[in-house]
Image (cartoon, helix red, strand yellow):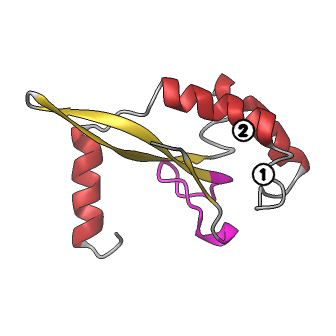
Amino acid sequence: MDIEIVLDDADSLICHRCGRAALLVVRVPTVMRMGSGQVSGRRTVELCSHCDRNEVSAQGVLAYFSVYERIDREAVDAAGPVLREWLDYLVANPPRYTDSDMDQEIRDWESGEM
């Protein structure tokens, strides 16, 4: 399963942790354990200059964004090395899907935000 980089309109990229604008959104492969089985899926991860400012794995990408406004289709190659470092970290340490994550997604779905 490949990593997906979301290159939407910059105004639509929102950090789910703080509600501020996200710099970048990616979807990384993950496996959830459910009972005795496993379910493969993807987790959406936002890069946020506020929430991720102390995240060592994101420092290179954050530095890129301190110079460039955004990563668009033309700039993905230029941002490649620092982006690869952060993505490799995310794949090796995928975000966990918790019960509170599921509760929030249910609330979002019920309110029409999903």
At x 78% / y 32%, what residue is drawn? Answer: 60
* Amino acid type for the residue under numbered disc 1: Val
Which type of secondary structure does the marked residue at label 1 adopt?
loop
Q: Is residue 99 left or right of residue 51?
A: left
The residue that label 2 is drawn on is 83
Residue nearest the viewer, comparing 93 with 13: 93
Along the line of sight, which residue is nearer the eye, 71 or 17? 71
The residue singled out by tag 1 in the image is: 76
Q: Position of residue 82 (x, y in %)?
A: 77, 34
Q: Which quadrant of the structure image shows residue 50? A: top right
The reply to whether discs 2 and 1 touch (Cβ–Cβ < 8 Å) is yes
Q: Is residue 21 above or below residue 63?
A: below
Secondary structure character of the magenta stretch overall = loop
Residue 19 is one of the magenta-drawn residues: yes
Q: From this viewpoint, which residue is outermost toward the bottom?
A: 112
Residue furthest left in the image? 35
